[in-house]
Structures are given as C-alpha cells and as structure tokens.
Image (cartoon, coloured by chain):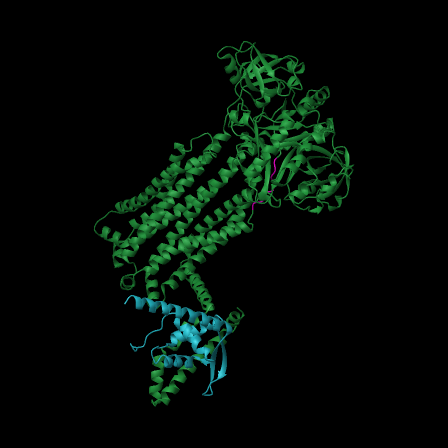
Chain colours: A green, B cyan
Amino acid sequence: MIHWLRRLVHKSRTESQLDKELRFHLEQQITDYLKAGMSPAEARRRAQLEFGGLERVKEEVRDTRWETGLDNLLRDFHYAFRSLRRDRRYAFIAIFALALGIGASTVVFSVFYNLLFNAFAAKNASRLVIPAIQDRESVRKSGPDLEPLRLRLSDLNPVRKQNQVFENIVGYLAGEIVLVNDGLQMYQFFDGRVTSDAFDFYGVPALLGRGIVPEDGKPGAPAVFVISFKTWKGNFNGDPKIIGRSYTVDGESRTLVGIMPPRFRAYGSLQQIWLPITSTDGMPGTAQESRVSLLARLKPGVTVETASADLDVIIKRLASLHPDEFPKHFDARVESASDFLMGPQGGGPVFFSDMKHMLYDLLAAVIMLLLIACSNVANLLLARATVREKEMAVRATLGATRGRLVRQLLVETAVLTISACSLGCAFAWSAMRVVSEVVPQAGGGASLGGRIGGEIVIGLDFPVLFFSMAVTVLVTLICGLAPALHVSRADLQPQLTGGGKGVNGSFRHGKLRAALVVGEVALSIVLLIGAGLMIRSFYLLTHVDLGFNTKDILVAAFIPPPSHSKTPPVEWSFSPEGQVVLKKVVDRLKALPGVAQVAVQDTIPGYGPVRGSEVTVPGATHAEEAGLEGCDENLFQTLEFRLKQGRWLSRSEVETAQYVAVINERLAHDFFGDQNPIGQQVKVKAFKKPSQPPKDESFQIIGVISDVKSVGPQQPAIPMVFVPATIRGGFILLLKTAVAPASLMHAVQEQVWSVDRDQIFVVFDSLKDFFQKLTYATTEFGVMISAPLASIALLLVLIGVFSVMAYSVSLQTHEIGVRMALGAQQISILKMVIARGVRLVAAGIAIGLIASYALTRYLASQVWGISTRDPWTFAGVIMLVVLVGLAACLLPARRAARVDPLVALRYE
Amino acid sequence: MNEDRTELLKGTLDMLILKVLALGPSHGYAIAQRLQQISKDFFQVHQGSLYPALHRLEDRGWLQADWKESDTGREAKYYSLTKKGRKQLDAEVLNWERLSEAVALILRTTE
C-alpha cells in the first residue's frame, strides 16, 4: 500500500525508471547482436523490431497498475463534463427529471424510515413493545380493537418477576393535569407519573440536570420532578437556573431536578412534566390501586409471538385473581411500539389511521415515480447515444476497447445522476420542512387516550442520505447501462460509411424508446389513479354530513385535578358545587365579546357519545345499546342540529332536571317505526356509570332530531338519547364564536380562572381541529404526499412524450420532406405525427389501466367512501393523461408540419 | 513471428520468471535470454508480456527490485525473489506438476 502511494506521489520518477529499464533491455539486445557480428545499423533495426513499440510496452506495464485506472476515470469525468456542457439543454432536462425523482423518493423514504423505524428516541427502540389486551366479546361485535393493557401498580412487580421475555417492564399514568405553583405564578401542566425506573429504561439522558432515577421511588425519598424541553422554553424562558428550585406540584412541594431534551416525549405524548411514582407514600392514597399503562422491552432474540404467549399466561392468571377488572374473555399480547403507533389499531377504529399501510403505499408510489424519471433519462441517453454512434465507432477504430467505451458512457451518466442527486437532496431538504408539518401528530388521540409518540424527526439524516446515494448508483446503472452496451455493440462498418444515423440502429432504438414511453405512461396512470382515489376519499371524508355544524366552535373542558380524582369530571359537573361553578362560568363566557352561544355537553361532538347505555321503550321486545348524552338547552342552537319532530330541551327542563329526552331518527325508527314517538317514554335501563343511577329510568320523548355522527365521520350514526346535563352530567363547554375560535382561547381561559383559580380548565381547540387531528390527518397526509408525486409524474410524462416525439420527428425530417414534395398537406403531416404520439400514449393508458385495476385494491385501507375502482377517478385520470399526451405531441407535430421540403431533401 | 516458437501458456510465465529468479537476482533482459536459452529457443518471451508480468509480480510483493550496476557497467533494474515469492513458486510448481501428471495420465490412458 505504502509502495503504491509512493508511486502515486512520485509518478514522474516511476515513469523515468520504467523508461530506463526498457531502454536498458533494448541496448543490451543491440550489444548482443553487435557481439554476434551484425553491423550497428542492422543490430539496432533487429532489436527494435523484436522489441516492438517502446510506448506500447510501457502502456501495457502501466495497465498493471491501479493508479492508471484512476487516471483514466478522472479523464473520463473530465470528458463527460465537457461533452455535457456542449449539450446543455439535454443535460438540464435529464438532471431536472432525475432530481425530481430522487428528491421525491428521498422525502418519502425519510418519512417511511423515520416513522416506521426511528419513531422513538429510546435505546434499542426496535425491541420496545406495548402490552395490550383484546376483548373477545368486542372483537365479535365490532372487529379487532386492541387496547393498551393497564395493570394495577401492585400487580406490576409480579408480572416483572414471572415473565421470561422482557428485559424490563415499566408503568406510567399519563394525561392528567396538575397545577404547578412557583409562588408567583400558577401553571397548568399535563403530567406523567412514571415508575421510578422508567427513565433509565427509556435511556434518553436529561438535557440539563438529571432524569428520574430509581432512588426517587423509594419511600421517604425527596419529592422531585422533571420538565419537557418545550415547557422549559415556553413557560420558563429556557432559564437553566430553575433546576433545583422548589415548586408546589398538585399541592405538594417538589424539586425540579432536570430538563429533558426536545426528542423525549415518552409516557404520553402530551406530557409537560414527569413525576416519579413513589412506592406507597407521597402519592394520592389510591396510588397502589391506580391502573398504569405499560411499556416493555423484549430481551434480545425474543419474538413478539413468544412474548405474547408468555404475557397471555401471566395476565390470565392475574385475571383469575381479580376477575372484575378484566373482560370475561380476552387475549393479552404484546405489539411492537412502532406497530402500535402506526398500525390500524393504534388509534382505535374511530381514528382511521392505518399509517403503516399508507407508508408502504407511498413508498411504492415513489418507486414508480423514480422508474418514470429513470425511463425519461434512459430515453434521453438513448437519443444521445444514437446521435453519437459515429463518434463511438471512431473511438473503437482508434483502439478503445468495449469496456473502455462502456465505462466512459457510464461515467457520463454518473455525472448526470450525481448532479441530480445533489439537486434532489436540495429539493428534498426544502420539501421535508413542509412534510414534517403535515405528518399526522402521532398520538393524535393523545388528548383523549395518551399514546407514546411525538419523537419523530423527519430529516436528511444519515440513513436517508445513504438511501438516496444508493438510489443514485442504481439509477446510473439502470439508465446508463442499456444505452452504453447498445452503443458499444454497434457494428463499426455502417457507422463509419453511413451518415451517422444508422437506419437499423435507430429503428431498434426507436422501438426501445417507444416502449419506455409506453411504460412511463402506464406507471403514471397507476400513480395518478392512486392519488386520485385518495383525493376523492379525502373530499368525501371531509364532506360527510355530520348532522351538525363544526364551524366556529371552540371546545373547552373542566378537568378536576388528580388529587380529587375520586370524583370523575362527569359527576363533579352535577354535584352542587360543580353546578354553581359551571353556571357562573357559562354566564361569564356568554358575556364575552365574540362568543355567540355557550353549550354544555359531556362528550366532544363527533367523537361521543359511544354506545354503552342500554335503552328500550315500554312494550318493545328488544333493547338497544345507544349513546346517552347529557346536554343543556343551548346545544341544539350551538351545533345547529336539525329538528325532525317536536322540540328541543327547554331551559327550565334542564335547570329542574326534568326527565325528558330528545332522540335521534335512528332510535325513533328502531323503536317506533312510522309512529309518532313524541310523548312516548324511553327507558334507560343501564347507565354507563352505575355509580350514579338516575332516580327514575323513564324519560318522556319531546323531540326527534336527524342523525348525528358520534363515532367518527366514517361510521354510521348510532341510536342516541339527549337528556338534561343536570341528570346525566356534562363538563365540556362548546362555544359558538362570531370570530375565529382560536383567537378566543386566551380570553376564555382568563374568564374561567376569574371565577375559580383552582379549577383545572383546558381550552382545547376548535372543533374543526379535533376533526382535523383525529380523523382527517392521516388521509390528508396521504393526499399531501401522493398529489405532488402524481403531479411530478405527469410533468415527467410530458417531458418523456415530448422528447421522444421531437426526436422521432427530427429523424424523419427527410421522409417528411419527401412526402411534402410529393404533395402531402401540412395538416396530414400534423395528423400523422399526432397519431403516432397518441398511439404511444393510448398503449400506455391501456397497460396502466389493467395494472391499476389489479393494484388499487391494496389501497383499500386508505380509501373511504368509494370503491377502489371508482369509475369517475379512472375516467378523470385518463382524460388528464390524454390531454397531457396531446400537449406533448403538439410542438413536435407543428415542427414536422413546417418542414421545408427543399431543406429536408438537401439533408441527403 | 517465428511459427516454431510457442507463445507461453497464460499464467505459466509468472511461474517461469519466479523459477529463473530463484537461481539469483537478474534484470529483465537476462531473464528473457535465460528463458529462451533454457527452453532451447522453444519459448519466445515478448517484452510486451515480460515487463507487465515483472511489474505485476513486484506489485504483489513476490519480487523485489533494486537498481544495480550490470556487467556492462550500466545501471539496471535487478529483480530478486522475496520470501513470499519463494512460497508462491513452490505452490505453483506443485500445481504444475499435478496438472502435467494429470494431463499425461489422460494422454496415456486414452491411447
């Protein structure tokens, strides 16, 4: 190696030594011939004849050395740059097309990789699993619905000891809100209470200070807490001096010991502060009884199946100890954390978020796009290769070997692809900033359920850059090799003697190029149909008739602090104390400028109520599980329900807790058919919360409204009963605003605090945002990625068809000239060229349609509301591609029609 | 070119060079001469094969080269066998013997 390096550095010395060595040989030979008695002239002649060319021998010696190869490669690069600069327009189109392809695939790969394989900042994140439970009963009723398993804290240790499959398993309680007071100011934070080993388990070190350590969980340990990066920046101005200070957290003095880095959102994605669960003391009395969510890490080599089997046995044993805490028939298993986050079950059936499937579909789409870009470039390279056949023939005659020619052409392609890769990465870098904005907030259901996530970072990180480089190498080979082999195979004779446009060669090329265009069009059809289906279903999804108006509604809620968590919000809301606060707050909010109406309800419209209350009517033979909703007199007006019969609840009925109810059409139809339900009774046989049984279970029906969606827009409406909030409870406020809802968030919060500063009251988002985050986000994400991909594909097809048509017209100039000289009209030439283009496009469309017909069923989980073979989408895409194809043919056709026969014939 | 003189089998040139050099250091011309003499002019070693081979063997570390004064008083590049080269020679000779035995066997038995 050192020897080689030395030779590279002392190149001239090596050369002169080689010269010296060979000359010595030659002279030695001459001396010998002289000794043999030849004349000096004769000796020299014989010796030189035998030696052959000195330079040739040198060249052969040089070929044994590696640095010669390097030298040639550099020369090839140099030459490639020069020849591409000569053909600037061609190079620009090729680089641009490829850069779009490489850029798009880099972005999609980054999303794919970072969401599926890099979603967690935890160490050994690939082995993170979430223990989950599936109620067999509900599977039978409504399909698979995997829920995270929650265990009593006191059951966690036995599970830790009994299992053979987990490295460790930790517990946490997420999603409660606590008040934090530093003596000057009151903060309201989402907290996460974690078993004290949870931070070590996760393995992300604190940014400042320390995380929670196992000692913090020992009885009598000083009370501590840590905060998130966002909280630190947002609420404490990023002041590092706050570490070590004491705060009152949920009524208890705690020391802030650490600030976590930005990429730490474990144990519930909303969490702003984390507290250790101390073993018995220091926690609200029920700590040992609270049921914690779980996160585990598999031992290396243990599969999800093995772990599931092990866990199932342990949990079933537990269930036999406390049968009332588990469903009657269930299966316990583990799900990889990434699958849980991205899979269809992650958000439950309501949230429609099969991200994993979608990511694979998008990856497939971008590979198609890349293929389109490749065939574009291959097309351009083939065209160029045809023009250069003569040049190659000359080179071959001058002694270039085939390998050398292929290498030179590959180097030219590499120059194109490497430039395209850099440009593509630049595209990708700027696109990623937009894309990270539209990535659905992992754990969109966090405000309701609290999921792991939020640690996803989309960027040009190392694996992604590596991917785009690998793509570049692949593209170089795909695009470059065929034309290179083609050219170097060419028979020399006709190239040198003919005009440089070998008829046979270009005919063959023409077929290959046409095939490439057909393939390109076919791929674009598949891509466009896929994107079209997503766009259509996004439109349908966002235009579902919900039965109410989501516009200008601000959602806010009372959440009693965990220290009084014996009283769930619903019950608090109709306790006498709660009633007073609620009434005061509603009155104040109504007076707020910009607020048109305030209504009370106990669920978020669109996402509640769910089935769960058994209702029937006197004389009916069956009962039904309906959604029961506590609300006040303003709800009707606020959400703009549509009244079918009777009237809505009145103010006095709500205030005096009258047993009256409004039902929806579905319930009316199920129990009364065509009869008038007004004045009839409806019996609520089982309330969802048995702790608050109503005094009487019969309600008089006073009105019927049209169906309202309450389990997500995709599901059909369920039977519903609306009763006064004073009976059923209600703690969620819906504010109909006359201005943009978000602009009132601060004012609303202030108003509530002016009534009672100790109330935890959260102003969420506008109702539209709930729909956006919980339901539309995934589909919208699919549209936001696939629509640009489809547009790029269309642009590439335009370029592809245009370049192949323009090229074939330029080859046919002579033929067209002859035709015109013989009397062909301009219009017929125009028709001829367009007809050829249309034939190519039509062939592509036909193939693309067959492929789409076979492939779109894989999109089934992304498409909602239409068939995956939606005829309107198919028809629309065909129209679009035909138009683009025609547009691409037009310019070359016009050029053909304008050929001057005299000029064309002179080409001869 | 003289028809009687056979071109060397591919790969055997390396072995022959190593063998010649096993007798002692030598320069390119002398190696060519000796190969020709020993084979009684049967092998014609062309410079176009000899020098690339020498450089290749040097690259692989089987030969080592030094510039020394030759008999005629001029500086010449003398190649000599390295330890690695000697091992390689042994291996190649063994191989060759096996091959030629096998070929001979086939020729005898098929007669």
Residue at figure coordinates x 71%, y 31% from the top left: A288
Establish if A648 lies above or below A177. Answer: above
Establish if A407 lies above or below A436. Answer: below
State which quarter of the image contains the N terminus of chain B: bottom left
Magenta region's main secondary structure?
loop
Viewer-closest of A204 and A146 = A146
Q: Which residues are magenta?
A: A451-458
Q: Is residue A586 visible?
A: yes
- Within the image, what quadrant is residue A589 found in? top right
Q: Is residue A640 left or right of residue A224?
A: left
User: Quick one: which residue is furthest to the front in this view?
Assistant: B109
Residue A657: give x, y in percent of width and height. 66, 14
Viewer-closest of A404 and A662 = A404
Residue at figure coordinates x 24%, y 51% from the top left: A820
State which quarter of the image contains the C terminus of chain B: bottom left
- Within the image, what quadrant is residue A267 found in? top right
Q: Is residue A711 visible?
A: no
Q: How many marks?
A: 0
Residue A448: give x, y in percent of width and height. 61, 31
Viewer-closest of A26 and A822 = A26
Viewer-closest of A835 and A118 = A118
User: Quick one: which residue is furthest to the left in this view?
Assistant: A822
Residue A397: give x, y in percent of width and height. 32, 67
Residue A21: give x, y in percent of width and height. 44, 79
